[in-house]
Amino acid sequence: MALQKEELFLKNKNIKPTAMRLLVLQYLFSCEEAVSLNQVEEALPNADKSTIFRSLKTFEEFGVVHSIREATLTKYALCKTCTAEVHTDKHPHFHCNKCDSTICLSHILLPQIQLPEHFKLQEQEYLIHGICDKCNAIA
């Protein structure tokens, strides 16, 4: 029996492919933009919110997704080249003020910032707010 692409993907990341993780990953594969915990929960109405959250946190820990913090909301997007050891998806994100979508701008790299002596960079985020191409075409 051939493995589903989601199951193979998780096994390659050394993550046990539970039924819930497979469902969450399948949903993430179908999304073109970053999604919130609530969006995943709405897409999987029979799933427990805490189980979905644990799956997303496991995915983040193992380099399957990266999180984007927007004021009071966190969204998750699939990583392209990350591992558990190194998150390489260092790019800005665009948040549309009209449709509330958040899009990875993977083709734009974040600049290397020279911090003062004895400062240690732990995370770097860059969130751009504006009107996305789809909403701008409507306006």
Image (cartoon, rainbow, N blue to C red):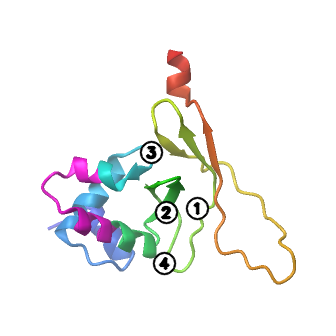
How far is the residue under mark 3 from the one under mark 4?
22 Å
| Amino acid bearing label 2 | His
How far is the residue under mark 1 from the one under mark 4?
12 Å
How far is the residue under mark 1 from the one under mark 2?
8 Å
Point 31% across, 48% down: residue: 39
**Label 4, on which residue?**
84
Mark 1 packing: few (<14 Cα in 10 Å), some, or many (20+)? many
Q: Would you say residue 21 is visible in this rendering?
A: no
Image quarter hosting the C terminus: top right
Relative to 104, residue 100 above or below: above
Of the image marks 3 and 1, the number of the one nearer the N terminus: 3
Front-lying residue, 66 or 126: 126
Mark 1 in CB contact with mark 2 (< 8 angstroms): yes
Q: Give how far across and how far down residue 2 sits, in percent.
A: 19, 65
Label annotation for residue 89: 1
Of the image marks 1 and 2, the number of the one nearer the N terminus: 2
Front-lying residue, 96 or 73: 73
Of the image marks 1 and 4, the number of the one nearer the N terminus: 4
The residue stretch that appears in magenta: 40-55
Q: Judge left or right: residue 80 versus residue 45.
A: right
Label annotation for residue 33: 3
